């Protein structure tokens, strides 16, 4: 075969693959949006859900999803980046480091339902907290940490060695070099990893079933005291998220409008992840521009 | 200065007993051997490096020039398995000693690399990065040093209107002069240059050479180069390396007109390497 023909063939195959991927994505999105958008209204987003009557909304579930995401990220991002820095810059190559790396990989590939069971044991029973937002966030941290560690390690390693040497050769300490040269350069790829992890957290149901629970207490959005039982900010209350809500109305819902609620919720979930993604990227770009002085 | 280099105040006697050391030299290398794992890359070399002079290191690829240069500011510490034996005496202290504070050492012995490696920050921040870390916070003082070092590096006129633009928007030659400027800004006593103009066009190269000659007033410079003309144009002394050995170390004029070792002559006249 002439190399030109081979080249054309390869190009054709790749274009075909790209088309398949794009059509799957478009198909999925339009299916979810077409079925769900018509159920989304201001009322749907701002009324609490109902257990038996039709016309319930998803106010609390939506809030819970974002809140658990926030708490998870507050715990997982510093730990994950810290772990990544350790693995990339401090861990001496050798047996121990290899073992740590294998553990991280195993942890990253655990099915989320298993992490849910582990969370039930650790953060619900042993601690005696019962179903809580914190328990859910910790389970999701276990679920996400390996990914963030891995992404941070890879991103830091891929910063050109030149830059690190340049900084050290100017009489700057290792730690300061990490903070001011390596992390800023690795920032865009770490951010991408974190966004992917956040998307997974936002859509996760299995790990939360047994840790954050299937119910939400009656919330008073005017109550900002994080220690009050009615406060949405209380991290020691049970919290059903959007993804868990979709699962629960479909499997054990008594409401007559199961389909409407779950399709609407699915659309809200997808749109939220999308918006969240775009927003995070936009902010990331702003920060990156600022630190690299590019316009 | 000297005491800042020591983590602990020990082992000073060795230096004091030899206070009659040659004051003309800034560095004294005694029997330096450098290993990468089992492999020896530098085989016991000894030489004095002159103060306020330019010393050129020449020799074929892989003969250990960079390895030697990087041992002077302890950059080889970053390479797992790299290890040095012997002595490099700087201000009566052995640089290779465990007790040397490498961070302080690198402030005094600056380095410019073969490939321009500016930080992906603004031109201004490239220079202030290390100054700020060293504790200089005052804006007016920083501005002053930025201007002064860019002027010394012959870059000021070209960048004075775009100090807060990204350093990566500069040409390769400008980037390299920026790297020299940020090293100058730290006011080192010794500057190590590893083929600083090999990636540059002839015009930038000429500028960098001019700059290096000019820097001799204030600094002691060691430069690795593959360019024989460059070595003969700018250096005071030249050291010829071959497979880890120091073959000949003489005044540049002597090396290039009347070398005493046959190998040196062969290399300089381009018969191998
Ligand atoms: N990181 C390293 N690990 C192992 N061996 C190395 C390392 N760096 C250099 N060497 C070896 O040490 C020897 C000297 O290398 P060095 O880089 O000092 O040569 P050089 O004279 O600077 O060459 P060039 O002119 O090509 O830059 C070479 O044989 C090289 O293979
Ligand atoms: Mg070299």
Image (cartoon, coloured by chain):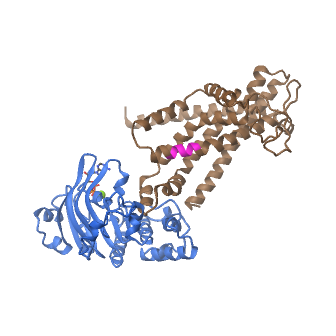
Chain colours: A brown, B blue
Q: Position of residue A37 (x, y in %)?
A: 79, 34
Name the dominant secondary structure of the magenta segment.
helix
Q: Farthest residue toward the bottom?
A: B217
Of B211 and B64, nearer the camera is B64
Left or right: where A293 falls relative to A3:
right
Q: Position of residue A19 (x, y in %)?
A: 58, 34
Residue pictured at 50% horizontal, 32% vertical:
A103
Q: Determine which quarter of the picture holds residue B87.
A: bottom left
Q: Relative to A205, is B23 above or below?
A: below
Left or right: where A153 falls relative to A278:
left
Look at the image and tell me in which quarter the C terminus of chain B lies. Answer: bottom left
Q: Relative to B192, is B213 above or below?
A: below
Q: Position of residue B110 (x, y in %)?
A: 38, 66
**Total number of numbered labels?**
0
Residue pictured at 56% horizontal, 60% vertical:
A294
Q: Determine which quarter of the picture holds residue A66.
A: top right
Q: Position of residue B238 (x, y in %)?
A: 22, 69
- Ligand 2 quadrant? bottom left
Of B70 and A161, nearer the camera is B70
What stretch of residues is rendered in magenta? Answer: A79-85
Left or right: where B38 falls relative to B185:
left
Look at the image and tell me in which quarter the N terminus of chain B lies. Answer: bottom left
Residue A88 seen in this snapshot? yes
Left or right: where B125 falls relative to B247:
right
Is A82 within the magenta?
Answer: yes
């Amino acid at each position: 075969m002439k190399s030109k023909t081979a080249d054309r063939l390869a190009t054709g195959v790749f274009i075909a693959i790209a088309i398949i991927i794009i059509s799957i994505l478009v198909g999925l999105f339009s299916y979810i949006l077409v079925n769900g958008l018509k159920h989304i209204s201001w009322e749907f987003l701002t009324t609490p859900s109902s257990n038996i009557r039709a016309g319930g909304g998803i106010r609390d579930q939506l809030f819970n999803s974002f809140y658990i995401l926030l708490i998870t990220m507050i715990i997982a991002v510093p730990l994950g980046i810290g772990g990544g820095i350790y693995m990339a810059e401090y861990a001496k190559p050798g047996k121990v480091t290899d073992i740590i790396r294998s553990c991280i990989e195993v942890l990253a590939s655990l099915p989320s339902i298993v992490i849910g069971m582990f969370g039930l044991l650790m953060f619900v029973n042993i601690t005696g907290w019962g179903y809580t937002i914190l328990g859910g966030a910790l389970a999701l941290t276990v679920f996400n940490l390996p990914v963030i560690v891995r992404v941070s390690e890879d991103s830091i390693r891929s910063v050109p060695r030149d830059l690190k040497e340049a900084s050290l050769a100017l009489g700057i300490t290792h730690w300061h070099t990490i903070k001011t040269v390596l992390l800023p350069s690795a920032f865009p790829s770490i951010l991408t990893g974190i966004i992917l992890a956040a998307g997974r957290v936002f859509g996760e149901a299995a790990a939360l079933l047994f840790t954050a629970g299937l119910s939400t207490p009656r919330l008073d959005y005017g109550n900002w005291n994080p220690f009050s039982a009615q406060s949405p900010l209380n991290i020691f209350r049970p919290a059903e998220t959007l993804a868990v809500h979709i699962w629960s109305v479909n499997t054990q819902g008594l409401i007559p409008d199961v389909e409407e609620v779950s399709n609407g919720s699915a659309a809200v979930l997808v749109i939220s992840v999308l918006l969240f993604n775009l927003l995070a990227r936009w902010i990331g770009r702003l920060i990156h521009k600022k630190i690299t002085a590019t316009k | 200065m000297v005491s800042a280099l020591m983590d602990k105040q020990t082992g000073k006697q060795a230096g004091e007993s030899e206070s009659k050391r040659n004051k003309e030299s800034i560095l004294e290398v005694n029997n330096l051997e450098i290993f990468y794992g089992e492999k020896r890359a530098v085989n016991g070399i000894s030489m004095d490096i002159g103060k306020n002079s330019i010393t050129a290191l020449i020799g074929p690829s892989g003969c250990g020039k960079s390895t030697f240069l990087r041992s002077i500011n302890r950059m080889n510490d970053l390479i797992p398995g790299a290890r040095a034996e012997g002595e490099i005496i700087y201000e009566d202290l052995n640089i290779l000693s465990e007790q040397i504070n490498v961070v302080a050492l690198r402030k005094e012995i600056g380095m410019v690399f073969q490939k321009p490696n500016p930080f992906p920050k603004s031109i201004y921040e490239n220079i202030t990065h290390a100054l700020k870390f060293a504790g200089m916070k005052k804006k007016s003082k920083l501005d002053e040093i930025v201007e002064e070092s860019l002027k010394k590096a012959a870059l000021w006129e070209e960048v004075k209107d775009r100090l807060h633009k990204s350093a990566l928007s500069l040409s390769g030659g400008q980037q390299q002069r920026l790297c020299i400027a940020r090293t100058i800004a730290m006011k080192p006593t010794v500057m190590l240059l590893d083929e600083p103009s090999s990636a540059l066009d002839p015009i930038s190269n000429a500028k960098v050479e001019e700059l290096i000659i000019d820097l001799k007033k204030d600094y002691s410079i060691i430069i690795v180069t593959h360019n024989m003309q460059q070595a003969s144009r700018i250096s005071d002394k030249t050291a010829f390396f071959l497979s880890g050995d120091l073959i000949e170390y003489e005044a540049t004029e002597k090396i290039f007109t009347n070398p005493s070792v046959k190998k040196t002559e062969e290399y300089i006249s381009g018969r191998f390497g």
